[in-house]
Amino acid sequence: MKRLIISGRVQGVGYRIWMQRKAEALGVSGWVRNRPDGAVEALLAGETAAVEELARLCRRGPRFAEVVRIEEELADPPEEPGFRVF
């Protein structure tokens, strides 16, 4: 499980919905939400290869995003199944 904080131009560009679609395609559980500081925060859980692939895809993001930095740390698994957008 990983917790990501994705910084840059990541709000207002469809990042959360894009991430939900990628997570569901890869079978990754967790959630994604906007933060008040302009970053996007996500919790990813699932098969290691799938979580790593989603984290890799997040470095680029959707078409109009400009990812500047991603902070990663280990995290506890989500409380609910599936991938949710907050």
Image: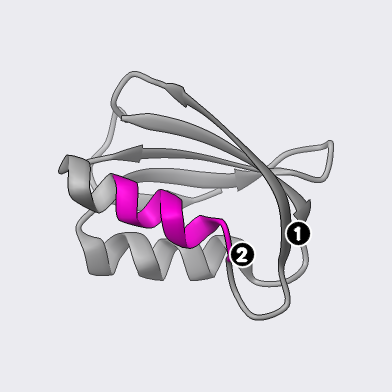
How far across and how far down the image is residue 82, in percent?
26, 50
Q: Residue furthest right?
A: 37
The residue tagged with tag 1: helix, strand or loop? Answer: loop
Q: Which residues are magenta?
A: 52-60
Q: Which quadrant of the rendered structure holds the N terminus?
A: top left
**Tag 2 residue:** 15
Label of residue 19 in the image: none
**Tag 1 residue:** 11
Measured Cα–Cα span from mark 1 to mark 2:
7 Å
How far across and how far down the image is residue 55, in percent?
43, 49
Q: Is residue 66 magenta?
A: no
Q: Is residue 53 magenta?
A: yes
Q: Callout 1: few (<14), some (14-19), or many (20+) C-alpha neighbours within 10 Å? A: some
Q: Is residue 13 above or below residue 9?
A: below
Q: Amino acid at mark 1?
A: Gln
The residue tagged with tag 2: helix, strand or loop? Answer: helix
Q: Are marks 1 and 2 in contact (CB under 8 Å)?
A: yes
Residue visible at 59% across and 74% down in the picture: 62
Q: Is residue 71 above or below residue 85?
A: above
How far across and how far down the image is residue 17, in percent?
52, 68
How far across and how far down the image is residue 61, in percent?
58, 66
